[in-house]
Every structure is written in C-alpha cells, then in structure tokens.
Amino acid sequence: MNTVPLDFEIPLADLEKYVADLAERRPSEDPLLLTARADLEKERSALYSKLTPWQRVQIARHPQRPYFLDYVNSCVTDFVELHGDRFFGDDKAMPAGIGRIAGHRCVVIGQQKGRNVKENVLRNFGSPHPEGYRKALRLMRLAEKFTLPIVCIIDTPGAYPGVGAEERHIAEAIAVNLREMMTLKTRIISVVIGEGGSGGALGIGVADRVLMLENAYYSVISPEGCAAILWKHRKHAPEAAAALRLTADDLQEFGLIDGIIPEPLGGAHRDPIAVADSLSEAIGAALTTLEKIPMKKLLEERYAKFRGMGVFSE
C-alpha cells in the first residue's frame, strides 16, 4: 500500500522514492543502492525516534491509519454486531457487538470513522451521538449479566456537539456511562488506537486497564481547540499539543494509562497486520491477568485508580 506522507514526512518520502527508483534500475548488491538504503534507514530512525507531540497527533489522524472495524476484521473472530440503544436509534459512529479476542469471549465496543465523504457522513466523522453511548451502556450491562469482559476501542475527536445531540442530552449520556462503568461487575479494558478526544473518549474509557497505541493521543481537548482558547489562533496547535502532555509516554508517566502498544516506524498504517497482532496480544494478556483478580478487589482497584488521578501536592 502506498502511504500518503504527512507534511513532516515529505523529505523522507522523497528519499524513499529515490531508493525505489534505484532498486528498479540497479542490482540488489549495487554499492550506490546499498548506500542509499542505509541512508534511508538512518533518516527514518532519526525522524521517528524524536517525534514531537504535534507530529504524533498528525500520525494518530492519518487517513490510512487502521480504524476500529479494521481491527475487528483482524482481531475479533465470530463477531456479531448488535444495534440500537432501545430509546432513540442506532449510532453508526459507535458500532458494537459480541466476539472473541485472543480466545476470550467478550463484548466489543468501538468508535468508527470513515475513509471518504459517504462513510464519514454515515459514521458522523467518528463523533458519537447520545444514542451511541446509551447503546454502549446497554451492551455493557449485557456483558455484566453474562459475565463477559468488555473491550472498548477509542478513536474519536470528541462526542458530537451539535444541537440534536444537546437536545438528546449528550452530557448526561456520557456522565451516566462514567458512573455505571465504575461499578460494572465485569472486567473492562479500553484501548486508544488513534484520537482520544475529551469526554467523547472517556465515555467508554473507564476501565480496569487503559492501553494506548504508541502514536495515539488522549486529551481533555484537541490541540486546535486549546490553541484557539489560549493563543486565540489554531496555528499554535503544535505548542498546545506539547503543553497538553497528550502522548502515550506522558500519560503513562502520569499514571493515567497502564500500557503502551508499540507501532512500526511511521505509524500503524505502515504495517496494520503487525499492529493488529500486537493489539490482540495486549488485550489477551490483560484479560488473562484481570481474570485472576477477585471481582470485589477489582472494583476497589478500579475506583482507587480513577480517584487517584489529578492528585498533586506543592
């Protein structure tokens, strides 16, 4: 698959094209080709070993990055999608169902974006409505009833802020999810695979284990939104991204997430199959660990985990 280079990747893409052209014209042991390949690997390692927070945000938003349903096709066997919140309708931005991950039967809930205009309209650009969160909670209660673990896959710029969502009480829907997920008597794992935007992400983010892909981000507000408030212009998004400390490394340092799933150099879109295998392995390992913890202790640890967030001293 030909990857679309991001702005900061264009010099590297030019070098990749040069090496590809050389490979077509010269034998594999040609000194010039070997030197060019060595230079390419050196430049690639140098670029991706010192990514800025803003560059990681750009990778998290890459149009070719795998989405929730891509991982369902790769990692989830026997998947059966379930629809509707039993109040208003079915939110296509929040598909959910039952399947198996790494041999574990579980309820799988995720947020889905589109890859073209038609899909983005159908999926509402990955921004769920209130009925999406109510559908998610309906399936979580189903999981609790049948003692199935819950796996939530987060990838949203944020919950939909439109008039219709406000009329149907988007804030209340998210708040109820936060409250109910804290006390659900089953194992819960959440994984941020791309964008983790504000309450839209947190609405399915209360979990016993919170994991992140290496180039995902998880933040109270988008860098552009933060820049518009603090600097009065979106052009300051790179500074805002750095100030928000939204990368996986930062969040793990603060104790806000429990683990980081590595990605290939350049991002998950460079090798989706390898990332899907890593994701499945990480979820399977987390579920195996959680199954050994008594439910009473698990609930106490979940409560203490989130109550401890944001505590600081001067």
Image (tube, rainbow, N blue to C red):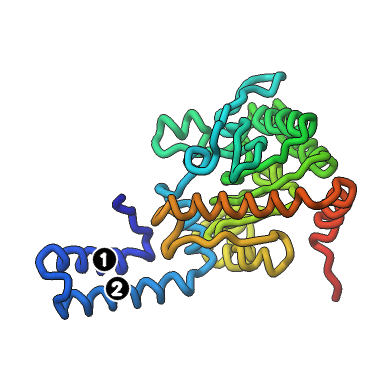
Residue bearing mark 2 = 40
User: In the figure, 291 relative to 121: above or below?
Assistant: below
SS state under label 1: helix
Q: Give left or right: position of 298 versus 270.
A: right
Q: Give left or right: position of 133 versus 28.
A: right
The residue depicted at 85 percent of the width and 41 percent of the height is 183
SS state under label 2: helix
Q: Give left or right: position of 224 versus 3.
A: right
Residue 204 is marked as: none
The residue depicted at 52 percent of the width and 57 percent of the height is 234
* Proximity of marks 1 and 2: CB atoms separated by less than 8 Å: yes
Query: Looking at the picture, which amino acid does disc 2 mark?
Result: Leu
Query: Looking at the picture, which amino acid does disc 1 mark?
Result: Glu
Residue bearing mark 1 = 16
The residue depicted at 72 percent of the width and 60 percent of the height is 256
The residue depicted at 82 percent of the width and 52 percent of the height is 293
Q: Is residue 232 visible?
A: no
Q: Quadrant of the C terminus?
A: bottom right
